[in-house]
Image: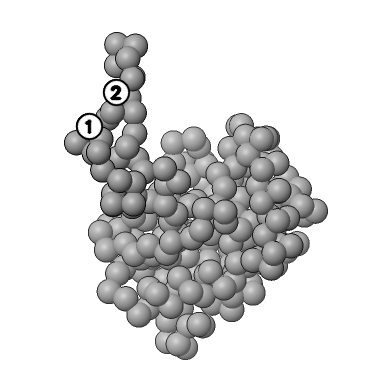
Amino acid sequence: MVPDGKSSVLGIIPARGGSKRIPRKNVKPFCGKPILAYSIEAAKDSLLFDEIMVSTDDEEIAGVARQYGASVPFLRSEATANDYAVIADVLMEVICCYQQNGQKFDYVCCIYPTAPFVTAGKLRSAFQMLQEGVGDGIISITAFSYPPLRGLAVKNDFVQMKWPEYRRARSQDLEPIYHDCGQFLFIRTSALIREKKVFCEKMLGMVLPELEVQDIDTEMDWELAELKYSLLKRWGRL
């Protein structure tokens, strides 16, 4: 689904240069090209966006972004490039800068820079769910592989159930619990400005398969993500 011609959509890819655990993470080669390129290409192929921009404080990242077809109309400020800035701060800064230039958007989509499993189809499906639903935003989520309600805790060196009331419950009878995939989210600009947070009160969820989700925080995570990506490509899932 593409926008109806009346709604304007801004794609923002936040990619600062100060990654600590994996140096130069956002431009590190992933299966043959900078990992940032996957997010840009998925956004372009979706045909959803009036503008696709990369918010960065780093000239090398800005160069890669432009090489793959994203715009970098300004560099991120020091206030939103430190270790303590949250993603809502980054998105709000971008929106304000565009508004100062007379550009306003009905929706904002945040696509994370290390999300090679994002596809144009997922973005289109999520946006359609948002437009057809009653929420102010939608976020990609996946279910925990093991029911958290059957989780264990260690207290005074002894293992015990965190929630003993579920001791005899069958796993299939427990409520599924999900977590953020770290891939993308859409939000109505009005809701972001009003609530000043990306996880708005009326947030919808698009559930993705666990195989198509991977946190990339360590070098081992990176190698595992490349293996998953190669497998999914071979299966025609990406």
The span from disc 2 to disc 1 (Cα, nearest Å) is 8 Å
Instruction: Tell me which corner region of the image, top left, top right, bottom left or bottom right, holds residue 221.
Output: top right
Structural crowding at the residue carrying mark 2, measured as other residues with C-alpha within 10 Å and reported as few (<14), some (14–19) or many (≥20): few
Q: Quadrant of residue 63?
A: bottom right
Question: Which quarter of the rendering shows the C terminus?
Answer: bottom right
Horizontal arrangement in the rendering, residue 74 relative to residue 3 (left or right)? right
Q: Is residue 119 above or below residue 144?
A: below
Residue 46 image point, x, y percent = 59, 75
Q: Residue furthest bottom?
A: 5
The spot of residue 217 in percent (x, y) is 58, 37
Residue at position x 43%, y 56% in the image: 141
Give the amino acid at mark 2: Gln
Tag 2, which secondary structure?
A: strand
Relative placement, left or right, of 62 versus 122 is right
Pointers 2 and 1 in contact (CB under 8 A)?
A: yes
| Residue ID for mark 2 | 160
Q: Position of residue 152 (x, y in %)?
A: 34, 28
Looking at this view, name the residue that lies furthest to the top. 156
**Nearer to us in this view, 65 or 103:** 65
Residue beneath disc 1: 164
Q: How many marks?
A: 2
Q: Residue furthest left?
A: 165
Front position in the image: 196 or 140: 140
| Foreground pick, 142 / 57 | 142
Horizontally, is 153 left or right of 90 in the view? left
Q: In this orientation, does residue 55 appear?
A: no
Secondary element at tag 1 = helix
Give left or right: position of 204 versus 12: left
Residue 79 appears at what percent x and percent y? 46, 41
